[in-house]
Image (cartoon, rainbow, N blue to C red):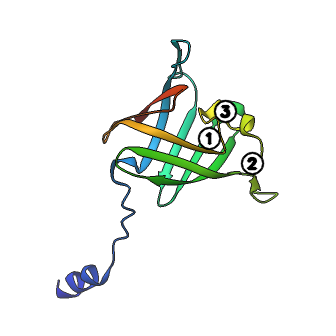
Amino acid sequence: MALVVAAMMSCEIEMSGNGDLDGYWHLVRVDTLTTGGMCDMSGKRVFWSVQSSLINATDYDRQYRGYFFHFDKSETTLRLFDPYADKRADGDIKVEDPSEISHLGINALDETFRIEQLSGSRMTIATEQLRLSFKKM
């Protein structure tokens, strides 16, 4: 028993500091704030996976079109920047055209969202144009 306790005490648990943001998020709704439109995404397979300092945003309905982003999070904002297309066989390729990532709710290569809600089960973030609503899986 002492050996088990000693082994557990010697392990370090890595904490990202991301709090409730860490995890696997399903994009369930996109509101277009400039027009008042709403798009139900709950039947679509668009997911953001957050871990450490990266977000992997993937649209599985587009034949696994995934992208990696670095991010900075504060209490009130979430900034995504430095996107790369996930092309494992060819190497990750830097995204130069923001239209390539717009289907993920991201309209700029360096975009800052306001955090409107962030809990262990729901996240809502917004820019001047869009509000994205997520459910944690």
Q: CA distance from mark 3 to mark 2?
A: 12 Å
Examine the rendered structure and indicate whether residue 88 appears above or below residue 4: above
Amino acid carrying label 2: it is Val
Q: How far from the left and from the top, in percent, is residue 107? A: 64, 34
Residue at 42% from the left image edge and 48% from the top image edge: 23
Side of 11 where 79 appears, left or right:
right
Q: Quadrant of the C terminus?
A: top left
The residue identified by callout 2 is 95
* Secondary structure found at label 3: helix
Q: First in sequence: mark 2 or mark 1?
A: 1
What is the residue that sits farthest to the left in this orientation? 1
The residue identified by callout 3 is 102
Amino acid carrying label 1: it is Thr
Q: How far from the left and from the top, in percent, is residue 101? A: 68, 38
56 or 88: nearer the eye? 56
What is the residue that sits farthest to the top in this orientation? 36
Local crowd size for mark 2, using a 10 Å CA cut-off: few (<14), some (14–19), many (≥20): some
Q: CA distance from mark 2 to mark 1?
A: 14 Å
3 and 2 marks in contact (CB < 8 Å): no
Is residue 63 at all visible to an observer of this figure?
A: no
Q: How far from the left and from the top, in percent, is residue 30? A: 52, 23
Amino acid carrying label 3: it is Ser
Side of 87 where 21 appears, left or right:
left
Q: Which mark is residue 30?
A: none
The residue identified by callout 1 is 58
Examine the rendered structure and indicate whether residue 133 appears above or below residue 4: above
Residue at 56% from the left image edge and 12% from the top image edge: 35
Residue at 80% from the left image edge and 57% from the top image edge: 89
